[in-house]
Amino acid sequence: MEVGARMRRILLTLADSIIPESPRTPDTLEEVTRHALVSLRYMPRSSARMFLWGMRLLNWAPLWRLRGLRPLTALPAAVARRHLVALTQSRWLPIRLLMYGPVGLFMSSYFDQDFAHREIKYAPVPFVADRIELRRRWIEGHEPGSDDEVHHPAALAP
Amino acid sequence: MTILAHRDYRQVETHEAEVAVIGTGAGGAVVGTELAEAGRDVLFVEEGGYHPTSSFNPYLTESLPRLFRDAGGTIIMGRPPIPYAEGRCVGGGTVVNGGMTWRPPEQVLMQWARLTGQPDLGPKAMEPVFDRVEQRIHAKPQHPSSIGEDSRLLERGARRLGWRYEPNRRAQDRCVGSNQCLTGCPTGAKQSTLVSYLPRALSRGARCLTEVRANRLWIENGRCVGVLGSGINPRTREEDVEVRVRAKAVVVACGAIQTPFLLLRHRLGRPSRQLGKNFLCHPNTKVLAIYPHDIYAWQGVSQGGQIREFRDEGILMAENAVPPGTAAAQIPFLGDEALELMKRYNAMAMTGVLVEDSHAGSVSRCLGAPLAKYSITPYDHERFLRGVRYLATLHFEMGAEKVILPFSNFHVANDVDDLAEIERTQRSRSTIELFTVHMMGTCRMGSDPRDSVVNMSGELWDLPGCYVADASLFPTAVGVNPQVTIMAMATLVAQRLRLPN
Ligand SMILES: Cc1cc2nc3c(=O)[nH]c(=O)nc-3n(C[C@H](O)[C@H](O)[C@H](O)COP(=O)(O)OP(=O)(O)OC[C@H]3O[C@@H](n4cnc5c(N)ncnc54)[C@H](O)[C@@H]3O)c2cc1C
Ligand code: SF4
């Protein structure tokens, strides 16, 4: 979805305040913002527009929270983040609702990157490759044995 | 195989078939395949793209837009608002679902038989239909090699507390527990309609128009004679080619939200005014437990079984490991605080509580998009709180360090005593965070036009030639994972569909 420079800045600011500060690569912010825009393309136009209006509203959160006159885009990232954290914990449901979209989009995109996978020690690709191979052998007639079971004995320690 | 895509459509094109089926999910694929196997010339119309097994990978950023409606970002309005997900690809929801196959409880089918006055919806009469479906999707228990530690942990916890835990039967053929069901099964084991029903239909000459959104029904002289839609350019996402399908009968199987959305465009369902009403969504809520040791819940099938001790009260509990991107979107923290918790991803047991609907919402049209409304009742709320307490208790019993709760005003329980706080803090239905993937019931089937939308053949009372065959047919909630019930109902519709001479 095409958006103007101002909206791009808003999205970058929101992404910057929502995702972890590190680890990041030089293009992490661009990447999660690009993904958000790709996702918007897959929505009905009216929903995408509503989402973008919601982001404009979030940008002016300091004003309507009566905590300042400047939008998030004009604030240091740490301050912007404090505003957004407060919104996710708001007593008011519509305000929390406003945060669902950006948190969902940016977090899922951030934790989808390989460097983030490494950080949390999640490695689906080799595991899946291993399992595809296991199924191939099974189809050839070698039923999986106990060695093929998923076991992490510490998990059931207590 | 005849699978057409956007590049194959000319500016205006009319395709002809005996039966046009809109949607290729649990309902559409089954009804179309049964008809194709009975010798009918079937044409599927599917909004999503065709993505074969070899294209599936674990990356959400790729999979969500390709396989899910609105890239997974859809919401039901109400108290509380409920985000929902539905498949949008060839195979529909069955491509991205967990593959669990539970028949509806006997009481539900007995109630359906009573409500419709038709004994052939009763448990005895439906048994051969369920048998047929389950045989075609290989519904069976999991092989031990596919079970992960999170499933074992939940099973052990349930036994320790004296609760009934039942292993899942799933639609799978040699599932190896890769835990990628949500982003499309990369091994081909999950028997989504993409690999079970649809290949049968295509081998019998059925055709499938993919990347075509059905926008209207083609109605002549009060009879449905086709579908008017447009091809979606996969690059720009614009609907830029007109596509028409002329058929003797049209089956609408777009799912419980999109089906009434399409039919309401024509102001149908007038005899009963029930079209879009009776919307059920079997909501669920998440309970994430952090253990002192790694569990690797992402290895092994996403759900090995369910705690069914409280089924009679409409409460089901189960594990459901999701990828880190999905988990991170659900935790109540941002920035580095979120990362700190996500560093414990391998030690997380991701579990959930499902509560059977006790009342219904509605689906209508608003600004060119569907508007789904649904609020939980105080009774549902109470059952959710009870379910969360049960699950959290189980986790502490099994040694969890802390439990992340699904409440916007009470995030973390550090021990079992903290759970007493649930009572005190959860007075409002607005503070619980819910999610759903089981939408049903907006075009209820019946034998009386005054209280149903379609007759017992699935045909609309006020539009001959137009049938419904998806989750919207359900007369009441099923209280279990719905896909086999949808497939069974679609089989019935195929058996009963009559073409004009
Ligand atoms: C993540 C997830 C996990 C789930 N897990 C389970 C489970 O383990 N067990 C279980 O029983 N159920 C599960 N479900 C639910 C189950 O998959 C659905 O209930 C079922 O697929 C619904 O079948 P349906 O035919 O009603 O609709 P769908 O399967 O949603 O199919 C509808 C199809 O119609 C297409 N369509 C919609 N509108 C149009 C239009 N205007 N023009 C053209 N095409 C259109 C869509 O693209 C889609 O392909 C899950 C669902 C999800 C999303
Ligand atoms: S667990 Fe893996 S192999 Fe099994 S059905 Fe799901 S995606 Fe396929």
Image: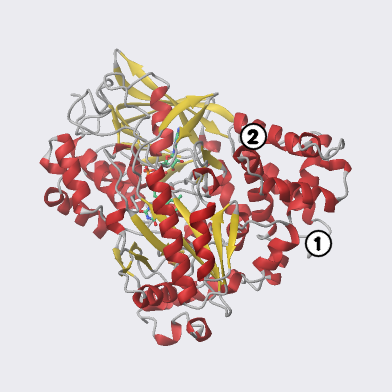
Looking at this view, name the residue that lies furthest to the front: B424
Percent position of residue B281, x then y: 40, 43
- For label 2, the residue is A48
Task: From this view, report whether residue B303 is shown above or below residue B197.
Answer: below
Q: Quadrant of residue B452?
A: top left
Amino acid marked by disc 2? Ala
Find out if the beta carbon at label 1 lies less than 8 Å from the nearest ligand 2 atom. Answer: no
From the viewer's side, name the closer residue of A138 and A79.
Answer: A79
Q: Quadrant of ligand 2?
A: bottom left
Q: Chain of mark 1?
A: A
Percent position of residue B9, x then y: 51, 32
Between marks 2 and 1, how big is the CA–CA gap?
A: 28 Å
From the viewer's side, name the closer residue of A26 and B102.
Answer: B102
Question: In the visual, does B330 lie left or right of B422?
Answer: right
- For label 1, the residue is A25
- Quadrant of the snapshot with the C terminus of chain B: top left
Q: Which mark is residue B51?
A: none
Looking at this view, name the residue that lies furthest to the top: B221
Q: Visible in this render: residue B188?
A: no
Q: Visible in this render: residue A149?
A: yes
Q: Chain of mark 2?
A: A
User: Looking at the image, which residue is at 70% across and 64% down?
Assistant: B339
Task: From this view, report whether residue B175 is shown above or below residue A111.
Answer: below
